[in-house]
Amino acid sequence: MQQTVFLSAFIIIMMVYEIGTPHSLFSEEATLEEYSVSHGGTSETTLPGFSARLSDKHFGNGTAQASITFKIRDDAGALFLRVWRKVSQGEITFALLVFLIEIRGYDYSDALVYSRALNGFTFGDSKSGNWTKQLKSLPANIKYITITFFGNYE
């Protein structure tokens, strides 16, 4: 009897917790894809005019593509993110579920100088999709930036 009451109370607590959280309680957020961009230099000087672009034809080892562009100008940086896919009529593909995007920027001494979490997006089963995000006014002293997408294909 006492075990049943304890188990029932535990299940109720877990259900309340689950309702109040945006992600499944029993699943971990899987890293779908992570990108890093870094530039040389060991001092505090910035690199005005620095620009890097990464292209990924198989985002998360799936059917989507991605493009990441990171730029530094005289007094600020900018990050341009794009994920897209084109699904032909009659083609069957899994849904792309991105729950969260985390962006972290570090300076020359590896100190965190920029941190941002973005809401995710979804491309439905056998559906095309296009997601873009532009982030401007990033600190110009970012030497190393990581962009991590959490999610999966289901």
Image (cartoon, rainbow, N blue to C red):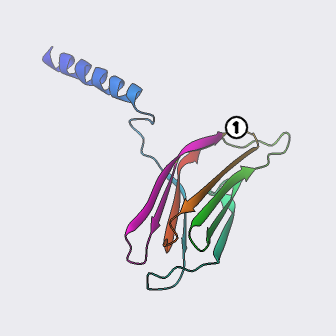
Q: Main secondary structure of the magenta part?
A: strand
User: Which image quadrant: the C terminus?
Assistant: top right
Q: Is residue 120 magenta?
A: yes
Residue nearer the viewer, 130 or 140:
140
In percent of the image, x 39 and y 37: which residue is there? 26
The crowd level at tag 1 (other Cα within 10 Å; few <14, some 14-19, many 20+) is some
Say if 71 sits above or below 126 in the image: below
Say if 95 sits above or below 81 in the image: above
User: Which image quadrant: the N terminus?
Assistant: top left
Q: Which residue is mark 1?
A: 125
In percent of the image, x 25 and y 18: which residue is there? 8
Say if 82 sits above or below 22 in the image: below
- Which of the 4 image quarters holds residue 108? bottom left
Amino acid at the residue labelled 1: Asp
Taking the view exactly as shown, the residue that stands out farthest to the top is 1
Horizontal and vertical percent for residue 106? 44, 69
Residue nearer the viewer, 101 or 28:
101
